[in-house]
Image (cartoon, rainbow, N blue to C red):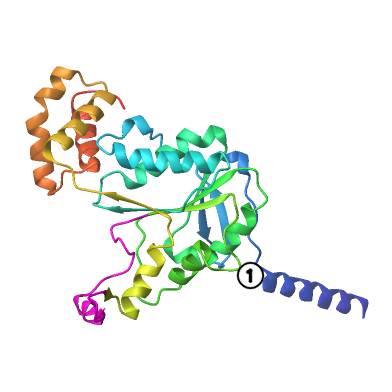
Amino acid sequence: MNEKFEHLLDRAEQLMARIESVLPQPLGAPDWSASIAFRYRKRSSGHGVLEPVRHVAQMRLADLQEIDGQKERIERNTRQFVHGLPANNVLLTGARGTGKSSLVKACLNEFAPQGLRLIEVDKVDLVDLPDIVDVVSGRPERFVVFCDDLSFEDGEAGYKALKSILDGSVSAAGQNVLVYATSNRRHLLPEYMKENLSYTHTTDGEVHPGEVVEEKISLSERFGLWVSFYPFSQDEYLSIVVQWLASFGVSAADAEAARPQALVWALERGSRSGRVAYQFARDYAGSHGKVA
């Protein structure tokens, strides 16, 4: 009887362990000393974890050219945040490849020695944002929750979760958390021509958006700071090319000679962006034996 009882007890413990493994678990804190940046990831079991980023992109503010106005606003807001002063959640919108996400990474490297940390969260995982805020709430560091290339379709769960954490929720973010998001959409949601028909006009000439438009605007306006990015002119693009070539050790004379090739490179890609300029510089430097 004792052997049967012990066998049953062992089987019950194994069963309980399996059940516990699939039940929702509270988000655990990572080794905060392992990195200055972390990614929130969902395991196949559904458990969320904060993983340290082992190799953080070494982007610097000085590396980013032709966006001085945007750089000044983001740097100032981040400095206020790190120093414990009032600061805003930030939405960076505009043309692709113009430095939106690079600027966030550069600010991380600039202010990491002063306690800034970054947590990257994918759109589909924004429903777990309150759990992330709870984990970092007691930490001395300052955390930027970073959502890159953010946009929503109608009805997505992450939309309401982000809206609540930004403003108007009992579980609002603490004093050591800000949200920085980049997007190609100014209001983060698709906008349709038919929605213009919902605008109403008052007798004194005022125009008021309809409920659908108001709902779409309501998320983006919860970001206190909007920073817009625009396509580069040819001269601005070439200036960025020269800067990146110099960073790879290409001489000024060779960089000047490479200008026609840089223009062809941009023409083939249909874009004169900072990303395209960087990609050309890497190709040119590599083909000429320069080491990154």
Where is the N terminus found, in terms of image quarters? Answer: bottom right
Q: Vertically, is 116 above or below 5? A: above
Choose top left, top right, bottom left or bottom right for residue 215. Answer: bottom left
In percent of width and height, residue 111 lies at 50, 35
Magenta: main secondary structure equals loop
Nearer-the-camera pick, 48 or 200: 200
Q: Left of 166 or right of it: where is 239?
A: left
Q: Vertically, is 161 above or below 186? A: below
In percent of width and height, residue 12 lies at 78, 76
| Residue type (three-letter) at the residue carrying disc 1 | Pro
Q: How many marks?
A: 1
Q: Residue at x 52, y 36 (%)?
A: 112
Nearer-the-camera pick, 78 or 285: 78
Q: Left of 64 or right of it: where is 35?
A: right
Choose top left, top right, bottom left or bottom right for residue 129. Answer: bottom right
Residue 184 part of the magenta-drawn span: yes
Where is the C terminus found, in terms of image quarters? Answer: top left
Would residue 56 be visible to someone looking at this image?
no
In percent of width and height, residue 200 lies at 26, 81
Q: Left of 222 or right of it: where is 281?
A: left
Choose top left, top right, bottom left or bottom right for residue 253. Answer: top left
In percent of width and height, residue 100 lies at 33, 47
Query: Helix, strand, or loop for circle 1?
Result: loop
Label 1 Cα crowd, 10 Å radius (few <14 / some 14-19 / many 20+): few
Residue 252 part of the magenta-drawn span: no
Q: Residue at x 17, y 19 (%)?
A: 252
Query: According to the image, label 1 marks what residue?
Result: 24
Q: Residue at x 30, y 60 (%)?
A: 186
Q: Which residues are magenta?
A: 182-206
Residue that extends furthest to the right in the rendered view of this protein: 2
Would residue 187 be visible to someone looking at this image?
yes
